[in-house]
Amino acid sequence: MMPGNQMETTMTALELMKLLADDTRLTSVLMMAAGPRCVCDLMTALDLSQPKVSRHLAILREAGLVATERRGQWIYYSLSPDLPLWASDIIRVAASAPDVKRDPRLKAAAGCEAGC
């Protein structure tokens, strides 16, 4: 994660769109727009293996889009507090789209329901 507002001058709209062009990363980010998610939340909602979800989370983390927080043995992922306002706005608007609100994958993760 980049310190302060450096991300605002380094992340471009093109880079953000490339990150969100993948369905797994987009869905993960939209889930995180509603609050922190652990890997097991994402695995359950996306119906993907832990290594595949973790690989996508690493890409988002390296780009500065998500932040991590350790809670006991689990790591929770959330949108970075250092996201530029324009990027946060794009994610917020996307998360409020009618098709996103109807997406059953997003409803599946209302907390760490997968037994972790």
Image: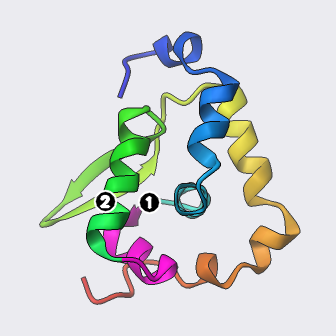
Q: Nearer the viewer, residue 39 or 116?
A: 39
**Identity of the residue drawn at 67% across and 27% down:** 14
Q: Is the residue 33 above or below the residue 106 in the image? A: above
**Identity of the residue drawn at 32% across and 55% down:** 55
In what element is the residue under mark 2? helix
Image location (x, y in percent) of residue 101: 77, 73
Which residue position holds label 1?
Answer: 36
Figure quadrant of residue 30: bottom right
Figure quadrant of residue 15: top right
Instruction: Specify start and end residues of the magenta stretch as a single range.
Output: 37-48
Q: Tell me if residue 113 is in the magenta stretch.
A: no
Left or right? Give the position of 88 relative to 63.
right
Image location (x, y in percent) of residue 93: 80, 49
Q: Earlier in the sequence, mark 2 or mark 1?
A: 1
Q: Is the residue 36 above or below the residue 16 in the image? A: below
Which residue position holds label 2?
Answer: 54
Q: Is the residue 24 above or below the residue 15 in the image? A: below
The residue furthest left is: 73
Q: Residues within 10 Å of mark 2 (few under 14, many from 20)?
A: some
Q: Is the residue 42 above or below the residue 75 in the image? A: below
Q: Residues within 10 Å of mark 1 (few under 14, many from 20)?
A: many
Left or right? Give the position of 86 relative to 82.
right
Q: Tell me if residue 39 is in the magenta stretch.
A: yes
Quote the CA–CA distance across marks 2 and 1: 15 Å
Q: Nearer the viewer, residue 14 or 44?
A: 14
Image location (x, y in percent) of residue 1: 35, 29
Mark 2: amino acid: Ser
Mark 1: amino acid: Pro
Main secondary structure found in the magenta portion: helix
Image location (x, y in percent) of residue 116: 24, 82
